[in-house]
Image: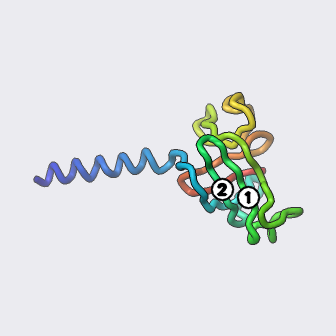
């Protein structure tokens, strides 16, 4: 009985580990808006996912820390893609999966596990 319980527990842990970093279902989420240059998060942003499409909106808290930004402004929008590096990105076209730079000179990076949106 202990062996069956151990196997079930191990299976549950492995399934959770493999799913937790995967993209999210359609819906509205709160992510942290993070800056790669300073390696820190500036505040929450609203993320709306509809299928493969994603739109990132500024919140009141984020607008207080981001220049020229008001509550409700669209910060970014595009297609959720898995980059060749294995990271998820906000692409403008499907070809962005092969972008040389992501986060800095290219598409923003999405961390679904920690709910972070990374941009330079």
Real-space CA distance between mark 1 and mark 2, rounded to the nearest whole angstrom:
6 Å
- Say few, some or many: other residues with alpha carbon within 10 Å of mark 2 (under 14 / 14 to 19 / 20 or more): many
Image position of 53 with respect to 43: above or below: above
Q: Which residue is mark 2?
A: 47
Q: Nearer the viewer, residue 20 or 69?
A: 69
* Residue 82 in the image, given as x and y percentages of width and height: 60, 36
Query: In this view, which residue lies farthest toward the left?
Result: 1
| Model colouring | rainbow
Q: Describe residue 73's horizontal placement relative to residue 55 as left or right.
A: right
- Say few, some or many: other residues with alpha carbon within 10 Å of mark 1 (under 14 / 14 to 19 / 20 or more): many
Which label number is shown at residue 57? 1
The residue drawn where x is 51% and y is 48% is 21
Q: Describe residue 119's horizontal placement relative to residue 17 as left or right.
A: right
Cβ atoms at labels 1 and 2 below 8 Å apart: yes
Q: Quadrant of residue 69?
A: bottom right
Q: Describe residue 61's horizontal placement relative to residue 16 as left or right.
A: right
Which label number is shown at residue 11? none
Label 1 vs 2, first from the N-terminus: 2
């Amino acid at each position: 009985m202990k062996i069956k319980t151990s196997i079930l527990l191990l299976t549950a842990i492995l399934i959770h580990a493999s799913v937790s970093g995967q993209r999210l279902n359609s819906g509205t989420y709160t992510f942290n808006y993070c800056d790669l240059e300073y390696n820190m998060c500036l505040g929450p942003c609203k993320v709306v996912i509809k299928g493969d499409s994603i739109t990132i909106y500024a919140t009141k808290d984020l607008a207080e820390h981001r220049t020229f930004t008001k509550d409700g402004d669209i910060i970014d929008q595009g297609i959720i893609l898995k980059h060749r590096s294995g990271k998820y990105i906000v692409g403008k076209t499907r070809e962005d999966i092969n972008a040389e730079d992501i986060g800095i000179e290219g598409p923003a990076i999405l961390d679904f596990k920690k709910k972070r949106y990374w941009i330079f």
